[in-house]
Amino acid sequence: MIPTVLKELLALASRKRKLFRVAGTSMAPILEPKDIVFIRPATQCHKDDIVAIRHPHKKTILIKYVKEIDENNLVELSSPTGTDSKEFGKAALKHLVGVATYNYSQKKSLTRGNNFS
Amino acid sequence: MEENTLSKLFGLNEIPVAEAHCDGPCGVYDPASARIAAEAVRSMTKKILDLTPPEPGDTQAVASYLNTVGRYVAIKEEQAELAKHELLVLWTDYFKPVHLEAYPDLHEVFWNAAKACSETKQHVSVEAADELMAACEKIHNMFWESKSREVNYYEAS
C-alpha cells in the first residue's frame, strides 16, 4: 500500500495538487500556523471539506471548513475559532481554489472522515 | 522532506498563504473609529479656514503661515483617508447581505460617506465635513441597531 504522503507528492509532481502555507490559528489544531497543506484544485466541494477559497470581499485566500452550500452556489464557511461566514458572509463557489487533501507538516490526511468538524 | 526541499524539488519559489486567521479583531467593530477620524477632518477644515494669511512682505510670517497650513492639510488628508478606510471595513466586513433587508439604503449611505471623505480631501469645505459627520451618525445608528444595542451617538469635540 502506497503511503498517503507519497501519493500526495506524486499528485503534486503531476500538478494535481497545489501547496499553501497556513496563516493564523482559526483552524487549529487540524491546521496550525505555518503548516503546509496540499490542495486538490476543484470546482465542487462538499459539507465538511476543508477548502481554499477566495475571500468574499478581499483578494486573499481563506482556508476553512464548508458548513453548507446553498442553492445559489454560495459556500458558508466555518472554523473552530476565529471569524467565518457569520462575520464576512458566504463565498462564491466559483471562487473555490480547491479542497484540502493533506497536511504535510503534520503528516495527516485532510479528506472528509479524517478531520473533525 | 523539509519545506525547502519540497520547494526546490517542485520548483515552488514561494508557497502562497491560505488565511485561517481572523479579519483582525475577531468580530470587534465600532463606527466610533470612523467618527473620530471624521471629527479630526472637520476640525482641521475649520482651523484652515480660521487662519489669517499674513502680509506678503513679512517673510517669517509667510513661512510660518505656510508651515501651519501644510500641517493642517496633511492631517486633514490623513484623517480623511483613515475615515474612509474605517468606513470600508464596516461596509465590507461587518455588514452582510442580510442587513440590506433592514437597511435597503445601506450601500448608498456607505457610498456617499466614502465620497464625502474624498470631498473633504479635495476641498476645504465645512459643508463636506458636516456631510461626512452626518453619514457617520447614520452609520452609527444602523450599526448599533443591527446589534440590537442602544448606544447614543456622541461627538468628542
Image (cartoon, coloured by chain):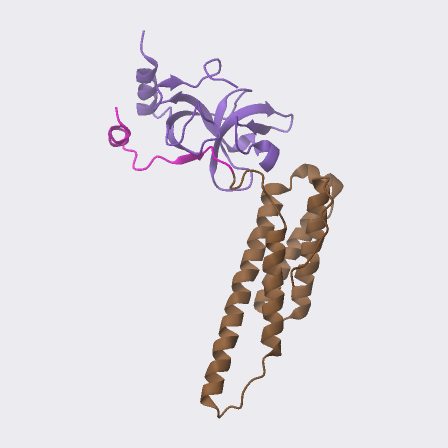
Chain colours: A purple, B brown
* Residue placed furthest toward the top: A1
* Residue placed furthest toward the bottom: B57
Quadrant of the image for the N terminus of chain B? top left
Q: Nearer the viewer, residue B109 or B47?
A: B47
* Residue placed furthest toward the front: B156
Residue A93, placed above or below residue A8: below
Q: Can residue B38 be seen in this snapshot?
A: yes
**The residue stretch that appears in magenta:** B1-22
Q: Is residue B10 left or right of residue A114?
A: left
Residue A25 position in % (x across, y down): 45, 31
Residue A79, placed above or below residue A111: below
Residue A47, placed above or below residue A36: above
Quadrant of the image for the C terminus of chain B? bottom right
Residue A116, placed above or below residue B139: above
Residue B49 position in % (x across, y down): 61, 76
Q: Is residue A32 left or right of residue B53?
A: left
Instruction: Report how many numbered discs are placed on residues in the image.
Output: 0
What residue is drawn where x is 62% and y is 78%? B50
Magenta span includes A30: no
Residue B115 position in % (x across, y down): 62, 59
Q: Nearer the viewer, residue B62 or B128?
A: B62
Residue A79 position in % (x across, y down): 53, 27
Magenta span includes B17: yes
